[in-house]
Image (cartoon, rainbow, N blue to C red):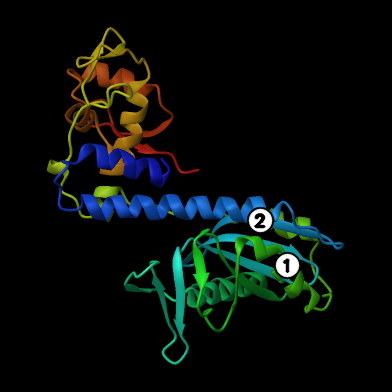
Amino acid sequence: MPKTLALECLLKRIPYNHRQREYLENQLHRVTAGIRGEGKMVRKFKEFSFEENYVPVWNLEMKLNEWAVQIDGLLLTERCAIVLDSKYVSGEIHYDAVNEEYYKKAVPGGEMQNLDNPVFQLNKHIRFIEKWFALHRINLPVAGLLVFTANSCVFRAKPAGALSCKTYQMNEYLHRILRDSPLTAVSHPLADIEKLIAANQVPFKKSPLIEFYRIDLRDLKTGVYCNKCETHRMQRIKKSWICEACGHKDAAADHLAVQEYFSLIDRELTNRKFRAFSGVDGPAAVWRILAKYDLEVTGERKTRVYRVKKR
């Protein structure tokens, strides 16, 4: 389940006065804004044009031993590879060059908020790609660009040590980087490098959200969600689901419930655990529900454990 949907489901299952509600709502806002910013960057790149060969690669999830990275974009050219890091930060951007500290200030009249210096993350991603290229004997220099995607972003000072721009400036900055980079004797065709990157994608193992955010399982509402009246009062009746609150029928309501369990609660599911989570009576009904899904299954009938298959 995408993190945005998982956070939305979690917020619907915790009480309105839960001590972490405000923090989780902020997390949802940040994740949603980040995805929106990455989308703006990808859409702006569609206007990019260059007379030489180039290949963009988006949303890389890669790993070297225990070193895992998520990189928003990588532009492969015959001059260099350019790491693209999207930053959705609204307000005024301030930078203290002496202490290498990076701040934002909500406008107008907002307080200063200390943020992680994005240059360090960009440089980490550049070093990762350089090392990955070296391991695969790919001869291609690596550069980087920070792309600030929020419409209300205002630079008062740009972070030192890396090129930074707004979304509308991105393609011009890419041209500047390429203009200043000499042609390289590329050891692999760009299409082959793209295929090699695709073959080395390693999706991150995401912890269930109650583990990640340290939320007590007992704080969550149980039951199957009704997408009409937004309660968790769907009841299993004759191989279908009917909401006891509003009468809405949804034969596939269990699909979201199974996704929620793996995303919110635990990586392992049993018949008993799903009955406790969903409110379904009787192990036979749960066996029939879980048999519909392409899950990894181990153990005999009474001790059967279900897991999401590794892709």
Q: Nearer the viewer, residue 60 or 188?
A: 60
- Residue 196 placed where, x, y %? 68, 57
Q: Residue furthest top?
A: 238
Residue 136 visible in image: no
Which residue does the image show at 49% across and 77% down from the upper left? 120
Identify the residue shown where x is 51% and y is 77%. 119
Say which amino acid is labelled 2: Val
- Is residue 11 visible in the rendered structure shown here? yes
| Residue drawn at point x = 39 percent, y = 45 percent | 4
Q: Is residue 57 above or below residue 284?
A: below
Mark 1 and mark 2: Cα distance apart in space? 19 Å
Vertical position of residue 160 compared to residue 260: above or below: below
Position in image of residue 87 (x %, y %): 50, 64
Occupied quadrant, residue 224: top left
Label count reads 2
x, y percentage for residue 83? 62, 67
Q: Nearer the viewer, residue 175 or 188?
A: 175
Quarter of the picture holding the N terminus: top left
According to the image, label 2 marks what residue?
A: 57
Q: Is residue 225 left or right of residue 89?
A: left
Type of amino acid at the residue the image marks with label 1: Glu
Q: Nearer the viewer, mark 1 or mark 2?
A: 1
- Residue 129 in the image: x percent, y percent? 61, 70
Q: Secondary structure at mark 1?
A: helix
Q: Residue furthest bottom?
A: 98
Label ID, residue 172: 1
Q: Residues within 10 Å of mark 1 (few under 14, many from 20)?
A: few
